[in-house]
Amino acid sequence: MPSTDCPKRAILYARVSTDEQARSGYSLAQQIEALREHADREGYEITEEIEDRGYSGATLARPGLDRVRDLVAAGTASIVLAQDRDRFAREPAHGWILREELEKYGCKLLALNDRGDDSPEGMLTDGILDQLAKYERAKVAERTRRGLLQKAREGKVIKGPKANYGFKFNYTGDGLLVHEPEMKIVEKIFRMAASGMGPKAMQTRLYAEGIPSPTGKAMWPHRILKVQMVLNDLYKPHTYDEMAPLLSGEVAGKLDPNKLYGIWWYNRRNVSKNHDSETDGNSGKRYVTRTAVTTKDRNDWIAVPVPAYLPRELVEQARLMIQSRTGLERKHQARQWELKGILRCSCGQNMITNTSRYKDNAYHYYRCKRASAYGPDACPQRMIRIEQVEPLVRDFVFGVLSDPDTIQRGLDSLIQRETEEVREDTDLEVNTLAEKLSQKAHLRRAYQDQQAAGLMTLEELAATLEELEDTRKVLEAELASLERSQKKPKELERDRAVVVASLVASIPEALDNLSGEEINTVYRKLRLRLIPSEEGYDATGVLCTLEPTPRGRRDQRGR
């Protein structure tokens, strides 16, 4: 319901998108101070000050913004203030969706850099400015990308927050110099690898000697030791003849033919981030950032020469030994662990897989990750043998799934959750999005009229229409998602009897023939989580909340 009791109450909202800004807090403090001054000037009573630290404006899945929406829905404010329009959302379509949602509760979004008003003309002005701002950001990003590529082609390192371990930046920040104290540790790592030690053994040795990792943590991650060091061309010496074909003539001409060089690669990977929210299993949300990394075509890589330090023979021997261990590591991983990623220690860490060999026998365990890394004193949970946990959980879960009454209750619970997640005003949102899609067609003609009147160049018009098309696709995706959310509970309700009958008929026979990997897949689909307890194992899942397993400490401790 619209807020009518306190029409002059405001929520202040600030956001920073990078971890560096979030740590310093400077940008957030500046935004909040500017908003306080505006609220005081306009006579608003501040209801709450809300911040999103380190969250991108490319998504609406933000804890602070969710808090804003909940407060507005409760009728506690008539306006939400932000310093800039892109603090609410960087995508114009997301901004429209958020604005429409809040207006249903009698609340407005206001940014200090708003140019228009609530009239159709004012909304059109702000819409055009949003599209042009996005177009300008895209141009700046492209210019920056091309500039960095050109800098790398000139043989210069692109400076990051920290130089690679064993190196330091030169005084101009575009080259690497050997940092001997760290490089001595790098040489130690290569000598351990060359002697036949694997990442686990090297990790244990470095931890025992008190040598901290590049991240400052006591334990060195396996990936840093193997991928970022031993197999990294940065530490491998290359001759002039090996380097010259990878470089431009100008850069190659600056090298000493009698020296060796490492390679700092640029433009090797595409990194994309997707921000989303998901349920945390306790009727709440958690916000996740998923990073996808893909390797580019090798012809697109750009080589930058850096000083070499290690003997080439040492590097080649270390690489040979570390790569020869791959077959052994894969052999240990060949077992299909049913509870991998499912079993968690009571200390909060994952239970990782562990295989030990004595004479000709192999023994498989689940072991606390913390205890594995820091020793048995770090966590009291002992290793759990597979034969004392996997059959127990398998029989228990499959027995639950084979019970028609349990399936019925699980489906009832699932339908209830799905129904609750469909907001009461979803129909209105669907109608609003459909209306916005219609408005996009009118906006397209409006932009063309702007260009015809000489207010936009053809280049700006083309870019704006392209952005408008992207906005239309976003709206269509939002509309399709809402329509699916409306249909899902109804489909589950309609197909309830068929689903129960099908599962009852197929589960007992099907589960008997599953491999360990397939059983693990079933557990993951059920979102099964197991935690050792004094009574046995506490288990929770999507379809049901499972009681602790009937066996006691014997099964938990593996004795």
Image (cartoon, helix red, strand yellow):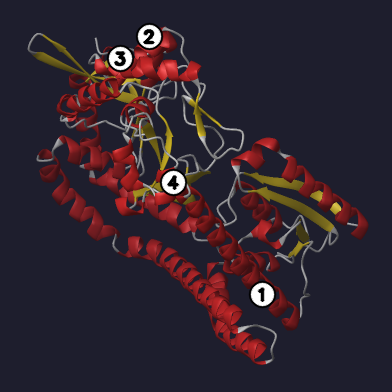
Q: Are marks 3 and 2 in contact (CB under 8 Å)?
A: no
Q: Do the residues labelled 3 and 1 touch (CB within 8 Å)?
A: no
Q: Is residue 318 above or below residue 26?
A: above
Question: Mark 3 = which residue?
Answer: 192
Secondary structure of the residue carrying numbered label 3: helix
Q: Are marks 4 and 3 in contact (CB under 8 Å)?
A: no
Secondary structure of the residue carrying numbered label 4: helix
Q: Where is residue 540 in the image (x, y as percent from the top left)?
A: 37, 35
Q: Position of residue 147 (x, y in %)?
A: 54, 55
Neighbor class of circle 4 (other Cα within 10 Å; few <14, some 14-19, many 20+) is some
Q: Which mark is residue 251?
A: 4
How far apart marks 4 and 3 lie (CA) works out to: 35 Å
Query: In the image, 469: left or right of 354?
Result: right
Secondary structure of the residue carrying numbered label 2: helix
Q: Which of marks 3 and 1 is nearer the N terminus?
A: 1
Q: Is residue 57 above or below residue 319?
A: below
Say which quarter of the image contains residue 199. Answer: top left
Badge 1 amino acid: Gly
Question: Mark 1 = which residue?
Answer: 127
Neighbor class of circle 1 (other Cα within 10 Å; few <14, some 14-19, many 20+) is some
Q: Which of marks 3 and 2 is nearer the N terminus?
A: 3
Query: In the image, 304: left or right of 177?
Result: left
